[in-house]
Image (spheres, rainbow, N blue to C red):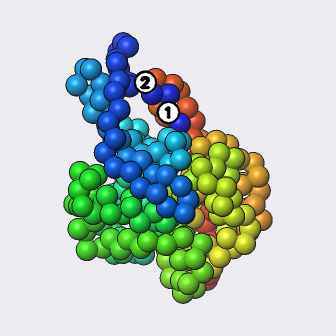
Amino acid sequence: MGEDDGVQPGAGPVEVHHVEVARAESARGELVLRERRGDDGSRALELRANGVFVMDTVEVHTERALARAALELCEDPRDVVVGGLGLGYTMHEVLADPRVERCAVVEVEEALVAWMRDGTVPHGPALMADARAHVVVADVAVALAEARPASYDLLLLDVDNGPDHLVHDANASLYQAPFLDRARSVLRSGGVLVVWSADASPRLEETMRAVLGEVEARPFPVRLQEREETYWLYVSRVPSQV
């Protein structure tokens, strides 16, 4: 996820036009998928929620980094759960690891899942066809509350822009101790939790440390729409039991 200023990356000024591809309404508001077209022939899909830029198909490094940060820390990531489907890039990176036997993706927006399945998002059907991928339409808090304890090796949370830049205020609870404690409970010994944030969040770091005992804040520099930005990955590991 990230922010957008409507300027297409390139060597010089590029005139940009936006064409709406799909729109849906839910209890959380409006979800819009649109294509960003530059007069230089460039094309990109862009996802917005309630008018706020969520992500596009140009800058996807952080979605992939979210997965890699966890995969690199886990010796045996057989079972992975991803909170937030987005445009599928975190799931894609997880499934690229041959050690992964199952990747459960929890996405609250039914329309977004449908757009991935039916090809509205062109790369979606191929991702969804992977037999190891299991996409569930649900609130991630509810899904984890119903999950069996110690059932996953990795939990990757990319549901919103982080605790300080929320698209949906209701997601504030996902960065607080009760939810993080539940996340810890569904992870196996040695399991890893990675939380993505659009900005540094000492409060999130402190809460994760209190709940999980350790946390590493990893800055991740990106170039987004001709701007230099720094996103953050907060990584915690469940202590291994001897």
Where residue 120 appears, as percent x and y from the top left, is 26, 53
Q: Residue, x 41% and y 66% (percent of image)?
A: 110
Front-most of residues 220 and 143: 143
Q: Residue, x 26% and y 28% (percent of image)?
A: 42
Provide the residue designation for mark 2.
7
Provide the residue designation for mark 1.
4
| Quadrant in which the C terminus is drawn | bottom right
Front-most of residues 239 and 153: 153
Find residue 40 and report its image quarter: top left
Crowdedness near tag 2: few (<14), some (14–19) or many (≥20) residues, C-alpha within 10 Å: some
Q: Residue, x 67% and y 69% (percent of image)?
A: 180
Determine the residue located farthest toward the front in the rendered image.
Answer: 25
Crowdedness near tag 1: few (<14), some (14–19) or many (≥20) residues, C-alpha within 10 Å: some
Amino acid on which disc 2 is placed: Val
Residue 177, compared with residue 150, is above or below; it is: above
Amino acid on which disc 1 is placed: Asp
Where residue 214 appears, as percent x and y from the top left, is 70, 62
